[in-house]
Image (cartoon, grey):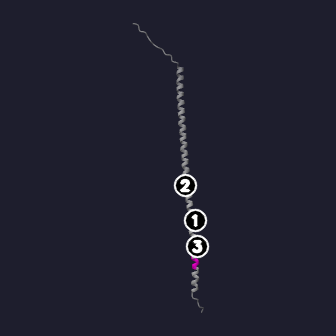
């Protein structure tokens, strides 16, 4: 019986292996960069939307407050006009009453007995 030694030898090209490893790493880095770029763009867009929403909320609050103050001012002006009208009416009535009082006073003085001089 004869035993044959069957050994095989493989030749490994380390440069080719290093080149393939580098290429695989570069591909992964490239894919990661693209993914990272998309994530950053998405986050920036979301941040801008949030900032825009905050600005719009601030503008709306300001507009609401401005409208409230404007309405309050118009209400006060309308109240002022109504008060002035009422005061003018009351003034006219008071003038009429004063005229009537003056007339009554003159009438009463005319009824007053004359004083005799001694």
Crowd tier of the residue under label 2, counting other residues whose Cα lies within 10 Å: few below 14, some 14–19, many 20 or above: few
Q: Quick one: SS at disc 3? A: helix
Q: Position of residue 112 (x, y in %)?
A: 57, 86
Marks 2 and 1, the one that precedes in the sequence: 2
Q: Residue at x 55, y 45 (%)?
A: 52
Q: Is residue 91 highlighted in magenta?
A: no
Identify the residue under disc 1: 81
Q: Position of residue 74 (x, y in %)?
A: 57, 60
As displayed, is residue 58 above or below residue 90? above
Closest to the observer, 28 or 12: 28
Q: Residue at x 55, y 38 (%)?
A: 41
Q: Quick one: SS at disc 2? A: helix
Residue sitting at the far right: 117
Is disc 3 in contact with disc 1, using a CB cutoff of under 8 Å? no
Q: Position of residue 33 (x, y in %)?
A: 54, 32
Residue 4: image quadrant is: top left
**Where does the magenta region start and end?**
97-101
Residue sitting at the far left: 1
Closest to the observer, 54 or 95: 95
What whole-number distance in Å separates the C-alpha atoms at marks 2 and 1? 24 Å
What whole-number distance in Å separates the C-alpha atoms at marks 3 and 1? 16 Å
Magenta: main secondary structure: helix
Crowd tier of the residue under label 1, counting other residues whose Cα lies within 10 Å: few below 14, some 14–19, many 20 or above: few
Residue 98: image quadrant is: bottom right
Which mark is nearer the camera, 2 or 1?
1
Q: Which labelled disc corresponds to residue 56?
A: none
Is disc 2 in contact with disc 1, using a CB cutoff of under 8 Å? no
Marks 2 and 3, the one that precedes in the sequence: 2
Query: Which quadrant of the rendered structure holds the N terminus?
Result: top left
Identify the residue under disc 3: 92
Identify the residue under disc 2: 65
As displayed, is residue 69 above or below residue 101? above
């Amino acid at each position: 019986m004869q035993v044959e030694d069957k050994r095989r030898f493989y030749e490994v090209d380390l440069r080719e292996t290093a080149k393939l490893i580098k290429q695989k790493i570069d591909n992964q880095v490239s894919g990661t960069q693209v993914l990272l770029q998309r994530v950053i763009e998405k986050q920036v867009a979301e941040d801008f939307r949030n900032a825009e929403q905050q600005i719009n909320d601030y503008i709306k609050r300001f507009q609401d407050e401005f409208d409230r103050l404007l309405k309050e001012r118009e209400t006060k002006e309308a109240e002022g006009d109504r008060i002035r009208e009422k005061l003018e009416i009351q003034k006219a009535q008071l003038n009429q009453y004063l005229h009537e009082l003056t007339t009554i006073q003159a009438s009463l003085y005319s009824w007053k007995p004359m004083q005799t001089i001694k």
